[in-house]
Each structure stands twice: as structure tokens, then as C-alpha cells.
Image (spheres, helix red, strand yellow):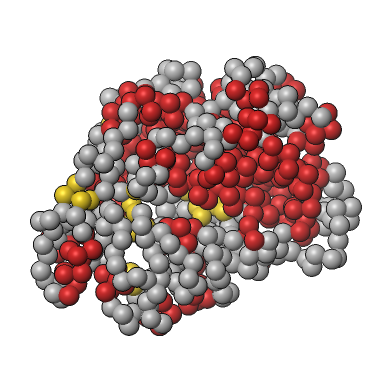
Amino acid sequence: MKNTIKYIALCLVAVLFASSCEKFLDRPSEDSYNSSNFYQDETQCIQGVNYLYNSPWYDVIRGFYRVGECFSGNYYMGSSPYLQFTVNGSDKELSDMSSSLWAVNANAITVYNRLKETTGVNPDVVKMCEGEALTWKAFAYFFLVRSFGDVPIIHDMSAMIAANNYNEVYKAPRAQVYEYIVMLLEKAMTLLPKKVANKDGRIDYYSAEALLAKVYLQKAGVSGTLNQEDLDKAAMYAKDVIENSGRQLLPEYSDIFRMQNNKNLEALISWHWDASAQPWTAQNSFQSDLGMNGMDEFGDVWGQWNGPSIALQDQFGVSAIQDPSTRSDVDTRRKATMMLAGDTYDYFWTTNGGFDYLRFFYDDDYGPSGTANASDKSMNSPTGAACVKFLYGDGNDHMAALGVSAGRMAYGLSTHILRLADVYLIYCEAKLHGPGSSTTDAFALQCYNDIRNRAIPGSVSAKTSITFEEVFKERNLELALEGDRWYDYVRVGYYNPTFCVNDIQAQRRNSWQGTLNDVYKAYYESGKTAWDASSISYNAGEFTPTADAILAKLAALPFPAEDVVYNPHLEDEPQEFDLSTIKF
């Protein structure tokens, strides 16, 4: 919470002085206004909320996939404390994530309060912007409560600062935090317009309603047993979004994650990043951490030492040590999620004939934007796989898609954090009752079958009954590496932690033993005809998380140490919060 105070002190300046090259994020010149003369017309009101779509979220990025994907077993990072369930309050990525989430909370309510003071502007525009700010505040709290459990409810940062009691705030029980998130979203929905088939990338009524459905599903088990009323509300809100929002699943799964589709009919809530990097925190930097050295020409990529896990390969029914020519690879989401030997991509390195995963490592004349490959000419992934989601390609790909140049750790690929496909599966799970249950609900079957038919077009038999376990797995296949999987375990862990422990301990979370690079290189040099991975085996003895370690992190991640020093009450038992004091 120390960082909360730091960010609120700069909040009014920050929300006014962010800039961008995209129309969606356009700002006036920085010397043309100040806090007393801003929010004077429709354009300024919209510009005032644009900042919430990127900059305060920037330091969430590394925690986003460490928590969401390493904990869950989808992403391998060697000795990472997130993979081994040993993360503590001194961890930098955890501290950065917490600070960033509190920054969103501070910025969102500051924008909202400033908009409430606006006069002489079209009230529909003002209400729309207010609703966007409250939705972002709700999403920040949604991340906080799912990550840290009981957290303080701080509705108005400015009021807390004025009262000078910021180091005396107690945590609220997580059940009340969920109720607070519901209040934020219900208020937002009274302000936001209902845009049918929204294509502008902005939050609208259905965006907030989709998040509300996700919140109700998540909170349904927080008491220790599933609450049917919460499940029913999750299903009701999800169905309304599906039937009435005009949103659609994109026909091609991989198209969701391409820059030219930054604003698409499947995306409900997205971080829209600014490649111009003004301010620095407005830009996307995912490729730097998740891509392979030499993926672009800016010398800013270093993710080749990690990779999508063997456990995730198992989920898709594929293996990095399997001959690519014999791989049964019918689910189109696999290739759009992670690269394996033999994969090629026509949407990366488009001016260089496309991207070939093996050629990338073993052809000295093959590189981004037509230049020599800058990698160290070795396949270093301990799992044999590399990320695809969150990568944009090279500079020419960026220019072709967005019309602006990428830069070092700065690109404009949007990050979709709530998609329509998620809402489909929210409805399915809401019609079930936890592990061991099944449903024949007609709409749930339609949703499930639609997801499967897109993933494996033309070869999936329609299901007439679905189980919880099928839906739980389908969520991972659909949303893998999108920062959400751990929170599926948190949700189920509220009421059935044994299921989560068993599922996680059954994963192959470790690396391959042997030199997989030699296997890949020999295969490539044989003209992709001779495959011999007999020297490779699974390193079963590397690490297995204990049940106690898993249960501890399911309950709550530790607060950053600096926050606890600043406010020791974060270590105390939570105190009931009077939600009737919340005023909008």
C-alpha cells in the first residue's frame, strides 16, 4: 500500500499527461492544458480515461504470466519461485504487480471523481467515461482479491489521503471484496452504453456485464461451498452477453492475437498499448520476456530459456520429443499458443517469407526484417516449445499492421484480458456444480460445441452432455498463456482444494532431460526426414510441489514486504467493512 500512496500523489498529473500515437489514445500537446482546464469537452473526457487502458497496468505484465501461468503449470521457468510455489513477499515481480494494481485503483477513482465534476459536456459521454473508469477499478480489484485474498477496500484514495489514515487500513474479508466489485460493476453498467457489435475497443455495458458474470462465477464458492444464486447470476449475465452484445467468435482462432485485430468482435476488455512509449509505461513489452533472442531486430528479446510447459503439451496431446511428421495436431489452438519443431507461421516475418521455428535456429542467413538472425543459433527452451501468444513478430510486421514503428520493448499489440470465448465457458461452468458434476443444459452444450468446432473445425462430434472436468480442461486449451489459468484453480480451490492439489501434482511441470537442441538440429539438417529423440526423457525428479505449498498459495499470495512494513495491519485478521458507506 506504500505504492498506492505514491501513485495517488501523481495520479492527476499522470492521467492528464499520458500520450499515444493511436487515435484510440490520442492526447493533446502536454503544454496546452492543466488539471483545472481539462475535461472541458467530449474529446478531453474521452482522452482523460484512455490512459487507464495501458500505462498503470504496465507493471502487471511479468506477474500476469508468472502468477497466471507458472503457478498453474502452463509455463516453465526453471527455478522460478512461481513454478516451485516458494514465492514470498520480497519477490520483485509480485511487488510490481501489486503496485501496478493499486495504481490502477488510484487512477481509476481519480478519473471518475474528476469526471463527476465536469459540467457543460454531453452527459452521455461523461457517463460513458465514468463507467469505463469504474470497470477498470473493478478489474484491478478482481486481480487483487484472486491473488492476495483478503485486501483493503479503498474506494476513494483522495479521501483516505486527506484523512491521513492510509497506514491504519485493515483488510476486508474476500467475500466482501467480491461484493464491492459487484457494486462497482453494477454502477458501471448504469453508466455505459449498450453497443451492439462494438468494434471500437472501448469498454461498454456488455464488457462490464461479462466481467460481472466472471466475478459471480469466481465468488460462488468463496464461502467454502458453491452458492447456487451466484452460479445462476453468472449464467444469466453470461447468456445476455452472448445473445445480445453482437460480439462474435472470430472464425480463425489465431486471428484474435494479431495486431490488425487489436479491436475485434471477440475482445470484451483489452489493454491497448502504445508503441510510441510516451510515457514509457504505455507500451507492450510481452515479446521481450516471452519471445526468443532474435525474434525482432531491436535486440530486446530474451525469453528463449523458458517456454510453454510439458504439462501444457500434454493437455493438447502433443510432445516436443515426438516426430513432427507423426504428430496428431488437430486442435488449431495449439499452434496459435506454442511453437514446436516443424511449425511455420505466415503471420510472423511476413516480408521474409514467414517464420519457420527450426530454420530460425539453424539458418545463419534467416532473420527478422530480412536481416541475419541475431540469436545464438541454439534451441534453448527446456521444454522444446516457445510462446506464440503475445508475440508480434518483427518491425515490418508491426509497421504493416499498425502503420507505426515498433521500438525496443515497445510495441502496440493489444492484450485481450476478457474474451467472448471465456464468457461461453463461464456459462458452461455456471451450469455445473464443481468436480464430478455434469449437465445437459442445451445452451451450455451449444457454447461448448461452438468453442470446440472453431478449435477443430469439421471434425468434432456434438456433445450431448458435458462434465466439469471437460469444461475445466477446455478453459485451459482455449485460454492457455493468457494469464488466467491460476485463477481457475483459485476459484475451484475455494470449495474443493483437493481437486486442485491432485490436478497440479499430476502435471508434468518439469523439463526434458537430454540435449533437445541436438535432436532439433539433426532433424533440420536432415531435411526434416530423420527424427531421433531416444536420448530425451522427462525429468521427473526435478521438482514436485507439496500439497501444503499449493494450498498456501491457493489461499493467498503474500503481500509485498514493503507494504507490510508500511501498514502492519495487512498481517492482521480482516475486519468487516461497512459497504453501505460506498457512495458513487
Q: Position of residue 134 (x, y in %)?
A: 67, 40
State the quadrant of the N terminus: top right
- Please state if 289 lies on the left or on the right of 358 as rendered: right
Q: Residue at x 49, y 46 (%)?
A: 64
Residue placed at 23% from the left, 63% from the top?
Answer: 517
Q: Quadrant of residue 547?
A: top left
Q: Is residue 550 above or below residue 379?
A: above
Quarter in which the C terminus is drawn: top right
Relative to 161, residue 413 above or below = below
Residue located at (54% from left, 44% from top)? 92
Q: Quadrant of residue 535?
A: bottom left
- Of 416 and 566, nearer the camera is 566
User: Is 524 on the left-hand or right-hand side of 418?
Assistant: left
Q: Give residue 215's position: percent from left, percent from top.
A: 52, 33
Q: Is residue 38 left or right of residue 299?
A: right
Horizontal side of residue 439 vs 173, given as left or right? left
Q: Position of residue 476 (x, y in %)?
A: 35, 43
234 to 312, vertically: above or below: above
Image vertical order of residue 355 relative to residue 443, above or below = below
Asked whether residue 80 appears in the rendered view, the answer is yes
- Give whichever of 509, 239 is nearer the camera: 509
Where residue 98 sits, quadrant-wise, is top right
Residue 263: % across, % down: 54, 60
